[in-house]
Image (spheres, rainbow, N blue to C red):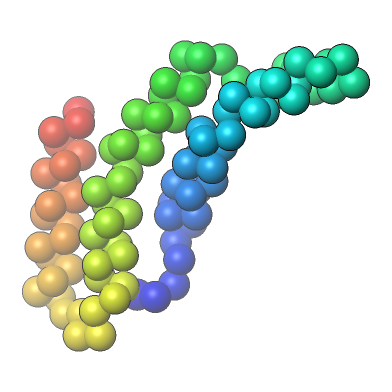
Amino acid sequence: MDVKTGWSLTLEWLERAYRSRQLTGKWLTHPECSDHWPLFITLDTWTIVKDDMENLAPIWNWALWMSKRHTVTVHHSIIVINVMFDHMDGIL
């Protein structure tokens, strides 16, 4: 349970990108970087990124809670899975 999963690393990457979006935008508007402007995403896409981060945050918190426990059992896994599915149902 202490192994980082791919989605958790993706969530961390999204959070870092979101926090640095304004700096990245300023950097890309510099004349020397104009070739890279197409790499900058739109405001609509940033909104989607923010929504994704908010939707994944509770799952990330549960994963951290589970990874800190040394007595993980199927009993705890079922509770966490049910909470995650309830959360995703609420989002949909």
Nearer-the-camera pick, 78 or 47:
47
Image coords of residue 1 (percent x, y): 34, 75
Image coords of residue 56 (percent x, y): 32, 43
Q: Is residue 84 left or right of residue 19?
A: left
Q: Residue at x 47, y 41 (%)?
A: 15
Residue 17 position by quadrant: top right
Q: Residue at x 70, y 21 (%)?
A: 26
- Is 66 situated above or below 10? below
Q: Residue at x 58, y 28 (%)?
A: 21
Q: Is residue 56 left or right of residue 13?
A: left
Q: What is the number of callouts on the image?
A: 0
Q: Is residue 35 visible?
A: no
Residue 55 position by quadrant: top left
Q: Residue at x 27, y 56 (%)?
A: 61
Q: Is residue 12 left or right of residue 74?
A: right
Q: Is residue 1 visible?
A: yes
Image coords of residue 78 (percent x, y): 12, 65
- Is 64 situated above or below 45? below
